[in-house]
Image (spheres, rainbow, N blue to C red):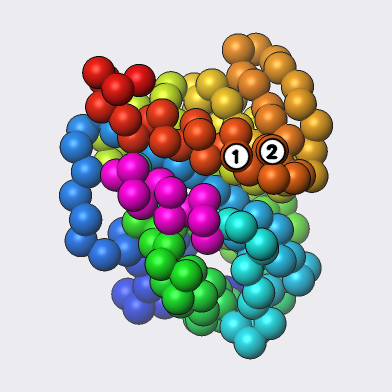
């Protein structure tokens, strides 16, 4: 079971919420962001990842993140980590795995600016037990927390994920579009979901990122 008393060692905003600003880059208030789920979106999903050596990046995801870096858009990881609440691993394991994922991205010249992780789950015990915590996707709490800390324009922000919960979190946070790994195109409540399957889908995502980074007169 994760030990909430380790909060002094890790960037825990509360026992079940990791909020880490990576690097020292400062973004202008009102910037849009690129939000990404982690497991199954950035790295290949291994179930409940607790071994850094098993981490492998998904094809082309580093190019997506690098495009956002080049456009001056903050890149923010928002990941559910119920394995901590379930007692499968602790925050120290999460830190090691996440560090390895960021290391693999850096090797491909792709950089993450903030990581938020939610460990709350109904299967947990003690302070991590929560049936519907506002920070756990599909609730929008992690996106809203990032927006509060960085002064983001959520309406113009994008989200990439591999589950419908990622898209729902984006919609409920006020985003207008997201890309779903191996998903289907859909539109609901003013939120457009685009599939992320082949090169054409990737090109569409890269074009959307480039458009956000363009100066007003270039759009």
Inter-mark Cα distance, 1 to 2? 5 Å
Q: Residue at x 26, y 20 (%)?
A: 216
Quarter assignment of residue 211: top left
| Mark drawn on residue 203 | 1
Question: Circles 1 and 2: CB distance less than 8 Å?
Answer: yes
User: Is 70 or 115 nearer to us in this picture?
Assistant: 70
Query: Mostly what secondary structure, the magenta segment?
Result: helix
- From the viewer's perspective, is residue 163 above or below residue 189? below
| For residue 181, side relative to residue 141 (left or right) | right
Whether residue 26 is visible, yes or no, is yes
Give the structural element (helix, strand or loop) at label 2: helix
Whether residue 14 is visible, yes or no, is no
Q: Residue at x 45, y 42 (%)?
A: 34
Query: Where does the magenta region start and end?
Result: 62-72
Give the structural element (helix, strand or loop) at label 1: helix
Bin the neighbour count of mark 2 within 10 Å (Cα to Cα): few under 14, some 14-19, many 20 and up.
few
Bin the neighbour count of mark 1 within 10 Å (Cα to Cα): few under 14, some 14-19, many 20 and up.
few
- Residue under pointer 2: 200
User: Is 172 or 22 nearer to us in this picture?
Assistant: 22
- From the viewer's perspective, is residue 160 above or below residue 83? above
Residue 109: image x %, image y %?
41, 67
Asked if the magenta segment contains residue 142, the reply would be no
User: Is 88 or 51 nearer to us in this picture?
Assistant: 51
């Amino acid at each position: 079971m994760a030990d909430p008393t380790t909060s002094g060692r890790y960037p825990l905003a509360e026992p079940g919420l990791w909020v880490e600003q990576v690097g020292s880059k400062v973004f202008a208030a009102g910037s849009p962001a690129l939000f990404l789920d982690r497991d199954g979106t950035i790295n290949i999903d291994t179930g409940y990842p607790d071994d850094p050596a098993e981490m492998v990046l998904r094809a082309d995801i580093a190019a997506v993140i690098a495009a956002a870096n080049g456009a001056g858009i903050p890149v923010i990881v928002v990941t559910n980590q119920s394995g901590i609440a379930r007692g499968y691993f602790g925050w120290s394991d999460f830190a090691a795995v996440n560090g390895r994922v960021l290391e693999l991205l850096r090797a491909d010249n792709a950089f993450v600016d903030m990581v938020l992780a939610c460990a709350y789950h109904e299967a947990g015990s003690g302070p991590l037990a929560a049936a519907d915590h506002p920070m756990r996707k599909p609730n929008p709490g992690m996106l809203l927390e990032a927006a509060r800390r960085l002064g983001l324009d959520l309406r113009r922000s994008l989200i990439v994920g591999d589950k419908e919960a990622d898209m729902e979190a984006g919609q409920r946070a006020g985003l207008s579009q997201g890309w779903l790994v191996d998903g289907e195109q859909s539109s609901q409540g003013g939120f457009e979901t685009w599939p992320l399957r082949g090169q054409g889908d990737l090109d569409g995502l890269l074009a959307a990122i480039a458009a956000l980074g363009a100066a007003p007169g270039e759009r």
